[in-house]
Amino acid sequence: MLLIELLFSFAHQILVCTVILSYRNLMDQYEKVKKIGEGTYGVVYKGRDLMTNETIALKKIRLEQEDEGVPSTTIREISLLKEMQHDNIVRLQNVVHGKKSLYLVFEYLDLDLKKHMESCPELAKNPRIVKMFLYQILQGVAYCHSHRVLHRDLKPQNLLIDRRTNTLKLADFGLARAFGILVRAFTHEVVTLWYRAPEILLGSHHYSTAIDVWSVGCIFSEMMNQRPLFPGDSEIDQLLKIFRILGTPTEETWPGVTSLPDFKSTFPKWPLKDIKTVVPRLVPAGVDLLSVSFEFDLCLKQLVRNVMVLSRIVTTLRRERLVNITFNIRPSYPGVVQRCRTSN
């Protein structure tokens, strides 16, 4: 497995180097208009393509702080985005290498779901729009998972919206990882706290597509309530907020939970609440979707979420004539079925 990991990483770095070298002298093609954001690895600018006059987003990655050149998160983001082409995933147009920086050139979208919810508090009262956004999130996530990519940082700020068409796109793949099998040992520190799945909060290093679908459930409930469902201010507070609503997990409701590194037998014992009382605007189909999205049992999550949940919401949307798109999602993987069998 380690050899496969190394070969995969090496292949991605070769791809990135090829992309960078191809556009080494193209920085003259773009101009910065204004700074619009800043993160761990660099700055994001609104810019302009001087050849086409198109407005673009320039993500500047600082290299001077990296002894080994391009940050690993940037390598992942470039290689994954170059491979994925989908209407609900932000488009990487170009890569430009400078002396001390690397520029990623993206299509420009100045609105994200967080800003949209803040500026449009009536969103929750328009179920048609909520369903339209939810469907597009699921489309993007399903595409990622069908290409064996975990986003790992889904949150409203990373969901960009085209004002003209209401098209929603997944963005910021800096934490994304490609996976060779459905369950892999990954780093603990992924996903912004409020949208982080309980298996990560409890210290599990073995997780998969389920963590993205948990995040989607959090985003869905936030659109409906116009506020985060689990707004924790620390990892333990986040867990307790989850348990107060979904009930404290046990070996019966989540086999293996007591063996996770950060599980405590002293956790308060809360019962499961009716999700309809927590997100009161939900129709029955929405209650069903959210309940399965927040299913604790890891095996059930992995076997059910990608197929049942996504197909169910698409069926609902088609019935209401909100979409007319063919939706395909891979079935569960044999490796996960075997793991579930051996763990019971």
Image: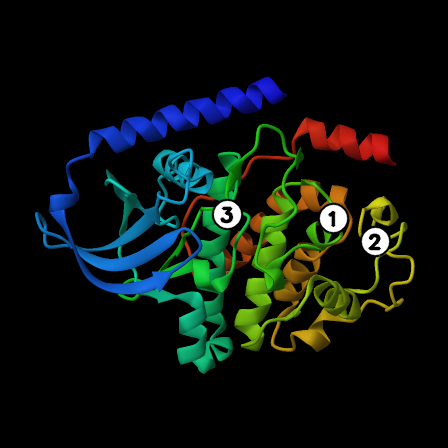
Q: Residue at x 43, y 66 (%)?
A: 113
Label 2 is placed on what type of residue? Phe
Image mark count: 3
Work out how far the residue at label 3 is from the one at label 1, CA to CA, in angstroms.
24 Å
Q: Which mark is residue 141?
A: 3
Q: Is 343 placed left or right of 212 in the picture?
A: right
Q: Nearer the viewer, residue 307 or 152?
A: 152
Q: Which residue is mark 2?
A: 263
Specify the farthest residue to the left: 51
Q: Secondary structure at mark 3?
A: helix
* Quadrant into which the N terminus falls: top right
Work out how far the residue at label 2 is from the one at label 1, CA to CA, in angstroms.
8 Å
**Marks 2 and 1 in Cβ contact (< 8 Å):** yes
Label 1 is placed on what type of residue? Gly
Q: Is 249 placed left or right of 18 in the picture?
A: right
Work out how far the residue at label 2 is from the one at label 3, CA to CA, in angstroms.
29 Å
Q: Which residue is mark 1?
A: 203
Q: Secondary structure at mark 2?
A: loop
